């Protein structure tokens, strides 16, 4: 199974982007997340049409899916007091910012939320890639731009 290395922040942005007139594709050869805006739409779509097996369209979650993900996470919270605060936060307007502001007071739970969010957002893409005999490997911000990130085409130097 070939690995596709993708910057986590770019992928998460594409999977949560709600901007109209914008789309994103994943280049399965390079791992790049390619944004499609009005000014580059024709060029990118021509590339995709010329090599459809090289690209996968990244479909962002809807607002309803985002709310469902938050509610699923809240059900995993073991502390009753925090669970109650989170439930109260999402009952009123500005659900996403209120939810996040509660979690920002709880660093461990915020980290757990971030892991949960990545898992949920990438689940269907991982399944789709697996059917193509590809494995999604996320590169965190801490590893981006370092030499410790493996590049599939690189071969070890022989001495």
Image (tube, grey):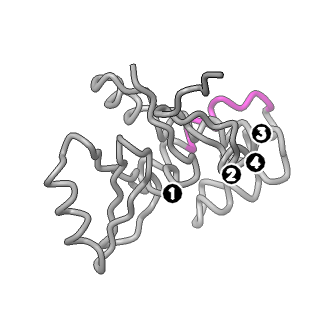
* Label 2 SS: helix
Front residue (pair 75, 39): 39
Q: Earlier in the sequence, mark 2 or mark 1?
A: 1
Q: Which residue is mark 2?
A: 88
Judge left or right: residue 24 versus residue 68: left
Q: Earlier in the sequence, mark 1 or mark 3?
A: 1
Q: Which residues are magenta?
A: 70-79
Q: Nearer the viewer, mark 3 or mark 4?
A: 3
Labelled disc at residue 109:
3
* Label 4 SS: helix
Q: Which residue is mark 4?
A: 85
In contact (CB < 8 Å): disc 2 and disc 4: yes
Q: How many marks?
A: 4
Tell me the CA gap for discs 2 and 4. 5 Å
Front residue (pair 24, 4): 4
Front residue (pair 146, 135): 146
Q: 152 above or below 6?
A: above
């Amino acid at each position: 199974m070939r690995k596709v290395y993708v910057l986590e922040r770019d992928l998460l942005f594409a999977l949560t982007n709600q901007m109209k007139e914008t789309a994103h594709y994943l280049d399965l050869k390079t791992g790049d997340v390619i944004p499609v805006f009005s000014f580059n739409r024709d060029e990118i779509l021509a590339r995709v049409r010329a090599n459809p097996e090289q690209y996968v369209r990244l479909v962002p979650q809807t607002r309803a899916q985002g709310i469902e993900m938050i509610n699923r996470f809240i059900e995993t919270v073991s502390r009753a007091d925090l669970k109650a605060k989170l439930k109260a936060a999402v009952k009123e307007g500005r659900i996403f910012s209120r939810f996040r502001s509660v979690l920002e007071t709880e660093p461990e739970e915020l980290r757990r939320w971030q892991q949960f969010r990545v898992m949920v957002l990438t689940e269907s893409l991982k399944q789709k890639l697996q059917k193509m005999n590809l494995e999604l490997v996320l590169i965190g911000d801490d590893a981006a731009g370092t030499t410790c990130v493996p590049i599939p085409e690189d071969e070890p130097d022989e001495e």
